[in-house]
Image (spheres, grey):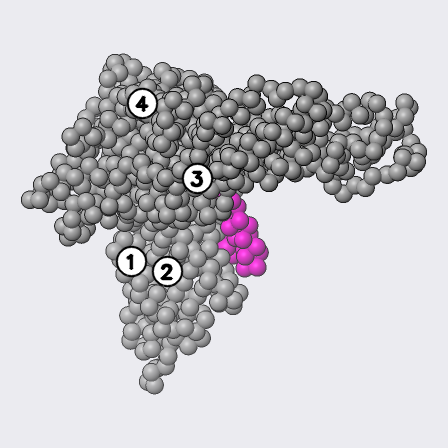
Amino acid sequence: MGRQPTGHRARPAADLRLAPAPGPATGLIASDPAGYRITIGPDDLDSLVFARLAAAGRRDGDAVLLRRGLDLWRGDALSGIESETVRRAAVALDEARGAALEDWAELELAAGHERDLIGPLTDLVERFPLRERLRGQLIRALAGAGRTGDALAEFRRVRSTLRGELGLEPGPALQELHRRVLAGEAAPPPRVVRPVRSLPRTVADFTGRTDLISRIAARAAAGGPAVIALDGMAGSGKTTLALHVAAELGERYPDAHLYIDLHGHSEREPLDPAGALLVLLRRLGIGADEVPADSDGRVHLWRAEMARRRALVILDNAASSGQVVDLLPASPGSLVLVTSRRRLLGLDGAHPESLPVLDEAEAVELLARIAGDRVFAEPGAAADLVGRCGGLPLAIRLAGARLAHRPRWQVADLVKRVGDAALPELAAEDRTVAGAFALSFGQLPQPAQRVFRLLGVHPGRLFDVPAVAALADLPAGEAGELLDDLVDVHLVEEPEPDVFRMHDLLHEYASALAAELPTGGRRAALGRLLDLELGAALATVPEPVRRPMMRELGVPGLPAATLVAAIAQPPARLERMRPYLGSLVAAAVDAGRPEYSWQLGRAAWRQLFGDGYNDDVRALFTTAGAIARRLGDELGQAISANYLGSVHFRRAQYDDALALLQESIRLRRRLGNPVALAYSLSNLVGIYSTTSRFAEATEVSLEALRLAETTGDAQAVSSHLDSRSLLMSRLGRHEEALILQRRRLMSMIDRADRSGAVYSLFHLILIRRRAGRISDRAAERAYRVVLRLSVRQRMGQVEAEAHSELGDVLSSLGRHAEAIDQVERGLETFDRLDDHRIYAQALNTLARARWAAGDRARAEADFGRALQMAQGASQPYEVARAHLGLGDCATDAETARAHWTAAAEIFTRLRVPERYEAAARLQEVDSQKDETGVNHCAI
């Protein structure tokens, strides 16, 4: 019976000496000092495979597995070998084969396959004439097939054989069988397989899930027993889907459609497997007296009965894999749909499918099927309603039922009633969404219940392990395990690894549970969460900048440092949590920690502002400022005004920015914080410089720099060195500008401030080019380095400006197409950042590149756009640049003179070097007598 492993051929015994020298095993045969050794794996001998298949077949009542094991035999075991030891082993193997044959025949008889068994059993009793059990099985098969005479004749033959061979009468079992055959009781006619239909009514308004239904149908068509495990949150429509699939695929399973509610999530105790088997067997028409009392007997009978049928079974509302595993048929030709609110991770061989909520289109369609076509007449209200239902089918059904029974209501009427508290309105008689959630919650162990309840304190819908650990005051590992438990029962979702969210209705339910907690407990949990979120926001700030920021905020150390350390990528996390920062800021007052309203916004400002989230910054500091004013917190007011002003500054709303900044400066002077005051003064320099108020900018910059140097705050000093150097360069004082900017660059290097160093490097190149201290080719190389660094460090503002400046350099080198491309990329980045501060400057640069390329029409259009934008933003310097360019593009002398005159007047008033360039244009046009309409745009 032995077989060689795949890919090996047996070596003759004489060849064993050719095996490798003593040492590690090589392939099948190896040698060692004691002789030769053969290494056998679990799949290398038929006897081992047979034993494994036979054991599994007996355990599962699976005739197919037993048959596969028996098919490995090719004759008597170990035939042709006369060794006494080998023969004893052969006898044991033959006996195991005989027992397996009898067990296989028993399962086939139980399955009603009597006619099919007569031939194989006849052959077997010829080969094993003394095995009384086989003889009895043949007699039962003959009697069951209606061949009573042949059954009696077989009994006579076995009695004759036993008398002749052994001098014995047949055993009691065979004699009792003979008596029953004579009485017509031995083998009752095979039970007639009548179609069974015990499914509940399905709904006529089933909607959506087409892809999922297609996948289930494909699994069912693949052959074998198909088991589909449908899991999802309470109310997601698992049972409805299972019944719909049964209706769609029912014709493939003509013998039985069975349904049982296992009460895994209900007010009743879950049904134990033995009880479930009793119900299922009775529904198949088996009498109560025929159902075995023991669980194993019921399992074997269930599988034998299912082997005779092509059946579809719905095991609804399962509590666990253990409740279901004994209910699964083992033979092909069946489809089992298991539904559960829990992920059935221990259900081997099942195909899991988790039900998502319906998308908006499916949800509106379902609502319309229930409530009627008036839903389509109010598309906006319908979308609002299904949105408040969170796409949850149960919620939509209950909302639709309310509308269907109130024909005078419009959809908008129900939307108003639902408002911000949907759960009380989502009810119909004794069916409620809250009730469905309560069943799931009630079955949680106490630690998981506590975490779920505390999630109702969290003002957002998205969270991670550190946030839950903070809320519940738990170690991160324990919080993660409890979150996994909540995911498994669909009270929490995990849309991506280690990122969790809660359905809106579940969050509303959790919030209601959290409201039952003592006020002190809720405040403490929210305070711990705010500690974490402040620490996480601060962790996104480079260390050299973080320290002065923490001093500004009055935070001595990184809050919740242990949990913050568990955050792998703080910038990515802040980006993910960004939509919920406003809710956290608003919740600070409820936590009794109002200072968090501005501290959290300040800590997050650097990344939010750098990534162009101006609306978020405005919303955060508008809320924080209002809270600070209500509480009389002047520090909070000063910080909120300063950073709210940054949004108006970026959007070129300079009057609003100036008013906010002056308010911040006034408060900071009164508070006596010279470092914070120095920062606000530096910001004021930026506004004055951008709006070409260079005299005022110069005056304020001197005060700011002196103040910063007095405080000794290196970050404040470097900030003012930068703003003053750019101002000096604009005024043509390049030597002073270079000295200041070099000081700043060295400071950034000393402090290992990479972002600050990139800014400084960029501005140093800019100043050197204005001063004529660097060639265009060298400037090109330097700007490309700055671009790479700015992209790597997510410095969008520097990236945008560097594209524009590189475009200007390339235009000077005569590479006009590349120049235009670079400036356009810069403008795209400005658009992404919603940054209008120097948008007019970039447009002027783009227009100049087009003019140099000979595209007069587009250059003129871009200069015109720059002029309009600069005038609207009160930027005289860029207004003058636009006039200078429009004069260059003019096709007649008078138009050119008008634009150049306007440019010269502005540049002269501003006292910037460009006044000489404009004057040269006017002098040139005055020296020409242009009587033929010379095109002054010609290059």
In the rendered view, tell whether residue 117 sits above or below residue 654: above
In the visual, does 629 lie left or right of 195?
A: left
Per the rendering, the mark at residue 869 is: 1
Q: Along the polypeptide, which appears first: circle 4 or circle 2? A: 4
Q: Amino acid at mark 3?
A: Arg
Return the x and y of residue 139 as percentages of the image width and height.
Answer: 55, 31
Foreground: disc 1 or disc 4: 4
Q: Which residues are magenta?
A: 768-794
Foreground: disc 3 or disc 1: 3
Return the x and y of residue 322 as percentages of the image width and height.
Answer: 45, 24
Q: Along the polypeptide, which appears first: circle 3 or circle 1? A: 3
Per the rendering, the mark at residue 441 is: 4
Per the rendering, the mark at residue 630 is: none
Foreground: disc 2 or disc 3: 3
Residue 783 within the magenta-colored segment of the rendering: yes
Q: Nearer the viewer, residue 118 or 856?
A: 118
Q: How far is mark 4 from mark 2, CA to CA?
A: 60 Å
User: Among all residues in the image, which is located at the extreme left?
Assistant: 408
Q: Amino acid at mark 1?
A: Met
